[in-house]
Image (tube, rainbow, N blue to C red):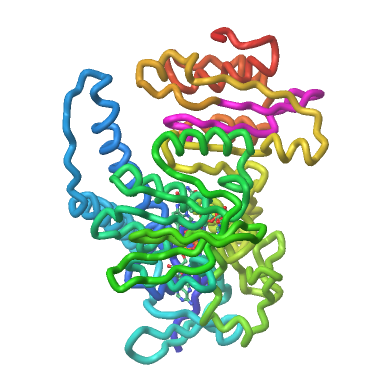
Amino acid sequence: MADTFDLTVIGTGPGGYVAAIRAAQLGMKVAVVEKWTTFGGTCLNIGCIPSKALLHASELYEEAAHSFGNLGIEVTPKLNLERMLAHKDDTVTANVSGVEFLFKKNKITAFRGVGSIAAPGRVLVTPDNGSAQEIQTRNIVIASGSVSVNLPGIEVDEDRIVSSTGAIAFKQVPKRLLVIGAGIIGLELGSVWNRLGAKVTVVEFLDRIIPGVDSEVARQMQRLLQRQGLEFKLATKVKSIDKQEDGTLVARLEPAAGGDMALAEFDAALVAVGRKPFTEGLGLDVVGVALDERGRIRTDARYQTNVPGIYAIGDVVAGPMLAHKAEDEGIAVAEIIAGQAGHVNYAVIPSVMYTSPEVAWVGKSEDELKADGIDYKVGKFPFTANGRAKAMLATQGFVKVLADVATDRVLGAQIVARNAGEMIHEIAVLMEFSGSAEDLARTTHAHPTLSEAIREAALMCGDGAIHI
Ligand code: FAD
Ligand code: NAD
């Protein structure tokens, strides 16, 4: 009889591969099952990593064309899209082979094929060709991730009408790109193609962009993105898209509240209206694993489903669909299975939108504090008053620190800035230690850095900033 594994993980995205590695480090005999040809899941293959490769390259292209001259560097950049896409593909390859190396290093056995649960303790692996194989295992972690949501009346062909997967692989820059959904995917990938020369129109059902993000930040970002050339049609929905014989797409746009329809022509369309948990083929109905009303696998605080020995983490369970949230749940579930006290602090999960400038936030927004009736104070410092930002010609944006009036404890922060995604972590660490705005303000920050703006914002929660 085949060996019994301590743990079998289905799916090797950031949730699954991190759970497998931590479990192996804790002494477990671990198997992973992956249906794709490479490891790393959505994030490494078609999500975070390739999109950031294109965001970085397109931002430099845009800067070379429009900002370098102000720094005394005269260049006329020429786009080589094929090379840019090759850079993206090379970045993906380097990352996914890194996961393969880590599996070998940690003596994790990898099975290729669709994993389905025949019973607690039994996973069937069905490869594309070949017969199914059964794995005996003491515990199972489901980390099957998520897939894009489709819209009725709009058929995604990944050529002209694409999800994010097609939008990181356009072979030429579409002249007119329709982006449906002003969430993070729509704005990041809309920014990429706008910088490379597309006329981008973003149609959003709600009357604001990036729902869930502090509304002052969303308003500011809408203004900045408009200045970069993105056009927004808010409170509008796309009813259908017709493909003409010459390839032109004709979209029927309708006010969200109903009313007269308008037609608009595009060369390509990106559907970016959210992602949904992926549970197909896992055999959950066979073993009776319960889902919630949104199709996510239900778990308890220890990531265990209603079936003992079967756990679930990452995008397929509740919570923000973020790679680092999935990773931290991967570590926590491995520690819990090993008998330790794994834990994720959901109140302090930073988020970053990698536009230009970047937007980063952690903890509560002002809207949430108001809704919760919490008495808070605001320290807000603009980058126009930061020396390093001036030297870098990166004065767009601000830092906002939100602290409790009674205790001075930092409750949340928002940063709009060139390096916001790197800067947010000092506030995350502070919040993990229940720190106050005064703690932040009394911490010496190196000069000249963009991070000094965080300290100044913290000072504004007390006696006032120095440089404004
Ligand atoms: P996934 O990464 O989705 O991995 C699931 C894996 O399970 C896949 O490899 C799949 O093939 C496999 N699988 C599923 N079912 C089976 C089965 N039955 N048998 C075998 N294998 C199976 N998040 C961030 O934090 N930062 C970002 O910058 C960011 N950018 C993104 C950009 C884009 C364009 C997209 C689409 C997403 C982005 N995300 C980002 C979100 C991030 O990718 C997800 O939150 C993350 O990948 C979730 O990890 P996961 O392990 O839960 O699932
Ligand atoms: P999202 O939920 O962030 O945004 C979708 C947007 O589409 C919303 O603004 C919504 O109101 C709008 N919408 C929904 N239906 C619509 C319709 N019919 N017409 C017009 N607009 C409509 O989803 P997303 O941008 O697709 O991203 C999916 C997930 O991937 C998110 O959870 C996000 O966290 C994750 N992601 C994260 C990053 C990052 O961390 N940098 C990057 C990309 C994706």
**Residue at (49%, 57%) from the top-left corner?**
180
Task: Name the side, left or right, on which 258 lies relative to 181.
Answer: right
State the residue in front, 268 or 293. 268
Pinpoint residue 435: horizontal percent, then vertical percent: 67, 27
Give the answer, above or below, for where 454 lies relative to 425.
Answer: above
Let me know if residue 441 appears in the view: yes
Q: Position of residue 74 (x, y in %)?
A: 17, 24
Seen at 78% across and 41% down, the residue is 371
Image-based side of 67 in relation to 216, left or right: left
User: What secondary structure do most residues of the magenta stretch adopt?
Assistant: strand
- Quadrant for the C terminus, please: top right
Residue 44 vs residue 111, the one in the foreground: 44
405 falls in the magenta region? yes
Span highlighted in magenta in the image: 399-420
Q: Residue at x 66, y 53 (%)?
A: 341
Dividing the picture into quarters, in which one does residue 355 lie? top left
Look at the image and say whether residue 377 sits in the magenta stretch.
no
Answer above or below: position of 13 versus 445: below
Quarter of image, res 70: top left
Task: Report the residue at 50% width, 46% height from top.
Answer: 232
Is residue 105 visible from the viewing direction of this image? no
Which of 340/244 is in front? 244
